[in-house]
Amino acid sequence: MPDGTIAAHDEHHGRHHPALQHHFQDLDQQHEASTLGMWLFLVTEVMFFGGLILAYTLYRIWYPVAWALGSEELNIYMGGFNTIVLIGSSLTMALAVRSAQTGAQRATVGWLVLTIALGLTFLVVKFFEYKEKFETGHVPGPNFHFLRGGVESPESPHVQIFFSLYFALTGVHALHMIIGVGLMSVIATMAYRKRFSPEWYTPVELGGLYWHFVDIVWIFLFPLLYLVDRSHHIV
Amino acid sequence: METMVVEKPVTYINHAHTVSSWLLTKDHKRIGILYLIVVSTAFALGGIFATLIRMELTTPAGDLLSADVYNRMFTMHGVTMVFFVLVPAVPAVLGNFVMPLMIGARDVAFPRLNLLSWYVFTVGFLFTIASMVLGGVDTGWTFYTPYSSQGSESNVLITGIGVFITGFSSILTGLNFMVTIHRMRAPGMTWFRLPLFIWALYSTSLVMVLGTPVIAITLLMLVLERGLHLGIFDPRLGGDPVLFQHLFWFYSHPAVYIMILPPMGVISEVIACFSRKNVFGYSFVAFSSLAIAVFGFLVWAHHLFVAGISPYSALIFSFLSFAVAIPSAVKTFNWTATLYKGAIWWKTPMMFVFGFLGLFLVGGLTGVFLASLGLDIHLTDTYFVVAHFHYIMVGGAIMGYFAGLHYWWPKMTGRMYNDTLGKLAALLIFVGFNLTFGPQFILGYLGMPRRYHVYPPEFQVLNVLSSAGASILAVGYVLPALYFLYSLKFGAPAGANPWKATGLEWTTQSPPLPENFLTTPIVTEGAYHYSKREIKVA
């Protein structure tokens, strides 16, 4: 045995917090590990969306006209409404974290439920937006059509790339929203069962980080997809 | 058995025996063993494909495999070996097992996530196996578009999904390791007291966390493109197939460092122990790992020198590719300096280290050849490239993996394997490897292209040499499987520290306790404190 290895005493802590997992020394270490893990996860998410946004950037530089035409087809009212909904949900999420921090347990549940409701609102609106695209033939694939004045536009293949990226980006984002709503439901249930206290509310905080991240992605997606050429400089 | 009751110490192996105690374990050591089983299976499978390739290439005519079957063989060899052997071998098998022990932790930061990573990995592997059962893939492991998105009639979708899924195992493992190294170190285990293997794992995790999501989204785009024909990678519809190559290599070049950095960490551990000397220039070796991880992200386009990228960007990528050789050279020089005036102890792990040093040197230097623009045009898509990356990935990474496996096997199992057979295996692998891939440098330089099942008759002698070498190599790889399995039952008990090594993992019993240490260790000195004057116990 090297001289440096002396016994450390785990035992003197006595009572452990019920949420403390046995491989951690104390709640602080557990909290710091979980938080760092969540931030790193968000870094991987940035890289994940980054690949798609790279493709978006390249093709937008190559096909500015198609981008302007495609973007024009998106429903700016629905998109704008959803943007407000998501920003609102970030506020309710932040308030949920704050309530958990101060030990206001009923308020925590309330804000979390409101956050879930706003998330679901977003998804419902998104569903109707997608439905519209299916009806107008703007879904990439064998049935894609992009008509200008009744005939297939020469820009049609490039607009199809725009819509491919639109569906990939918003689809992956919507998937994150669905996962987020599921996550929030679990956390809200935990909050309802009074599992959180000012001493330990890590899941609310980490859920909040995730939720804000998904919101921020939308804050980027909305102008990138909906606001390409609304003032008609290009077409 | 005598009637005397021998009290056996509780270990992570014998404290529970049911199948579910393994399949639902959250113990990093057991998860490491689970990875070992899947990775070894994949290695055997990839080896079978390689055998078929070398058998076909003993004659110039395509007499054993048709062109189509041959394409599927080298593709599945590549996919299996890259994604299911090289990427997970050292981090997921050895890293999982020894990393928490080395930093004095009870487990990784997220044990459940660790188990999930193994399941995700295994499901990805099963998808890939399914694609093989259904007839395999023929695109090459690089899945280049537009062939993969429209031309190929093989199972690109299933394989793509399999690799996509496996990627998440890599991401989660990298994340878990980074958090563990940041937050789970024992009291007193400062960054500069960490073993160099930990620095290597940390750098690798950085690459896994930053790179793997990009290959995931790229494969997702490929799957969508192939399934729905969106045009993202189809030049007829305005898409750009070269974009796929950029995105693919943005991950897949750094992935080379995922494969080689952890074995480099193993080399640092083993070389110090068996030279009875502390690693020369600890902080240089530590930071060179980080430097490789960072530089590794800036060289991907050297795979695209012939794909029509701008000559200016090619120039810069060529320069950066030269630059990445510097931290690798720093490591190699420091290892050599560690040997200098050391008391070298000729045991099996050290034999693999010597093999690594020789082969990695050749692989690294031929990489410098390929980084030079002019020469690369001549050598692209020839056997020279095949030989180069096998020297790095097999000669480097697999040698390092074997060095680590032979070094930590007594810790993992509590048993010693036969050292003479181990040395024989190291020798066979070294000789067989050089005979297999040495001639391929010449073949490539003479212009033999890769990925063809036929070749002009004048190349036959070198190809026969290569295939002969491959048979020796195969014996060298089967041998450890045999003596390792034999040692499980009949090996001599290893004791806590058979190599008289320093480092926390050797202070606990072998096999370790389920909770690693009886009490959390408190660290007061660096990982290496070797002295030549110590008495060696053979």
Image: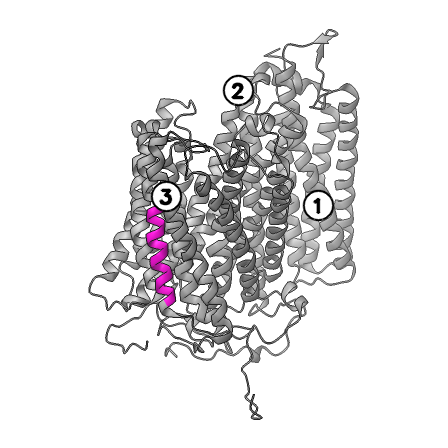
Residue A36 shows up from this direction: no
The range drawn in magenta is B421-436
Tell me if mark 1 has few (under 14), some (14-19) or many (20+) residues whose alpha carbon lies within 10 angstroms of its own: few
Report the quarter where the N terminus of chain A lies: bottom left
- Extreme residue toward the bottom, this view: B4
In the rendered structure, which amino acid carries the disc numbered 2?
A: Ile
Of marks 2 and 3, the one in the foreground: 3
For label 2, the residue is A61
Residue depicted at 54% across the width and 66% down the height: B29
For label 1, the residue is A179
- What's the magenta bit mostly, secondary-structure-wise? helix
In the rendered structure, which amino acid carries the disc numbered 1?
A: Ile
Horizontal side of B516 relative to B313 (left or right) equals: right
Q: CA distance from mark 2 to mark 3?
A: 49 Å
- Callout 2: helix, strand or loop? helix
Residue B493 or A182: which is nearer the viewer? B493
Residue B343 or B329: which is nearer the viewer? B343
In the rendered structure, which amino acid carries the disc numbered 3?
A: Ser
User: Label 3 lies in what chain?
Assistant: B
Q: Position of residue B236 (x, y in %)?
A: 58, 17
As drawn, B278 above or below B220: below
Tell me if mark 3 has few (under 14), some (14-19) or many (20+) residues whose alpha carbon lies within 10 angstroms of its own: many
Q: Position of residue B519 (x, y in %)?
A: 50, 77
For label 3, the residue is B466
Of marks 1 and 3, the one in the foreground: 3
Tag 2 and tag 3 share a subunit: no
As drawn, A5 above or below B471: below
Horizontal side of A66 relative to B359 (left or right) equals: right
